[in-house]
Amino acid sequence: MKKTWNIASIELENPVVLAPMAGYTDSPYRRICRRFGAGLVYSDLISSLGICFNNEKTMHMLEFDPEERPVNLQLFGAIPEKMAIASKVVEKKGFEMLDINMGCPAPKITKNGCGGALLKDPMKIKDILQAVVESVAIPVTVKIRIGYSRDHINCEEVAQIAQEAGVKAIAVHGSTVEQGSKGKKNWDAIKAVKQCVDIPVIANGGVKSIKDFFAIQQYTNADAVMIGRAVIGRPWFFKLVDRALDGEEPELLDREKVNPDVLFQTIYDHFDLQLEYYGDELLAVREMRKHLHGYFHGQPESCRIRDQVNKVKNKKEMLTLLRNYQNTFF
Ligand SMILES: Cc1cc2nc3c(=O)[nH]c(=O)nc-3n(C[C@H](O)[C@H](O)[C@H](O)COP(=O)(O)O)c2cc1C
């Protein structure tokens, strides 16, 4: 597989992409993933209306560090004019590309016609994408699912609309909106999208191992592969894929266990970045808890340590807990 690839004129150093994951892919975690070699990182989905209304929390989500570059900022919304205004703000903030969410199944998003609900309305998709593409000079990408439901698989139609509107890459999650994150992923539909457009296609859904990474890429012929849940608490997975792309044996890499020094250094670095980014100990601790659940998955007495992590209230307690755990078991 070719290592470098492009979205418009932006060259990406490898075809391994961090999926947008609300509540996880904030600036600190994107920095960690880039340090481990993710070729491209996406932000959480961010409300176009929140940007238009200058909502404080939303605007903080637009703060990022140059270390994350290239970073793709994901917007959601259903009103073309508001999406265009928000896109201009994103461009001004310095993001090198901008993604439109057309797959989120959460009712609080779909009930307003946003996210996955858009897949039921291809004309609306066209209006939104045209409005956004016309309003900015940076490349616009879109992330879709294969369709709204099993009886409504329309990813090829949507991909063609996106391409005609001037979208520069499309990520396809091989599930329907109704399916959520459960069930078998439909790689045939991703493959069909790849065959019907000329823009780069990013395959997504169900990659848990390096073997899966190559399987989905080879089956769909996608230009890149996006990984979500498998990198929560496991950002070094990007490095392993990168090594496999350089020729190391996937099966051996899949068996490689993380070195405890790397595990703890990553956790301390991640927590430091959370403290710096949020500027509030309790908030940083809260954000860190869910990541620690991931980091401690499969580690000794992980249930007990996760319970304790949930009770921690400040930086000092967190660092004491982490050091005691490290000294006891590693
Ligand atoms: C906790 C969580 C939050 C997510 N948030 C978003 C989001 O903000 N935007 C989006 O397009 N997809 C979101 N997704 C979907 C992922 O980007 C990805 O498409 C999905 O998890 C399938 O990939 P995976 O099997 O590698 O996890 C989210 C998934 C998870 C698990």
Image (cartoon, helix red, strand yellow):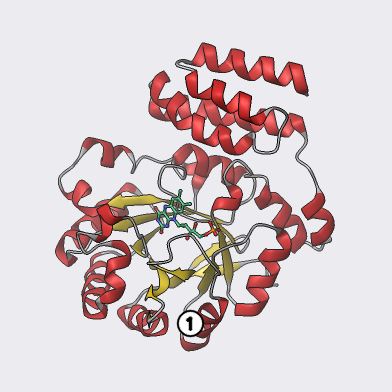
Q: Which residue is mark 1?
A: 193
Q: Position of residue 40 (x, y in %)?
A: 53, 56
Give the residue type that dot 1 points to. Val
Image-based side of 82 in relation to 313, left or right: left
Q: Is residue 202 above or below residue 263?
A: below
Please report the residue visible at 27 percent of the width from the left and 40 percent of the height from the top.
59
Question: Does residue 248 appear anywhere in the picture?
Answer: no
User: Is residue 299 or residue 197 the one in the foreground?
Assistant: 299
Quadrant containing the C terminus in the rendered view: top right
Quadrant containing the N terminus in the rendered view: bottom right
Q: Position of residue 150 (x, y in %)?
A: 41, 77
The quarter of the displayed image where residue 132 is located: bottom left
Image-based side of 250 in relation to 124, left or right: right
Q: Position of residue 125 (x, y in %)?
A: 26, 74
Q: Position of residue 97 (x, y in %)?
A: 40, 59
Q: Is residue 25 above or below residue 185?
A: above
Please report the residue visible at 84 percent of the width from the left and 61 percent of the height from the top.
249
Look at the numbered disc 1 and give the secondary structure of its residue.
helix
User: Is residue 136 or residue 81 the one in the foreground?
Assistant: 81
Image-based side of 82 in relation to 174, left or right: left
Q: Residues within 10 Å of mark 1 (few under 14, many from 20)?
A: many
Q: Is residue 166 above or below residue 183?
A: below
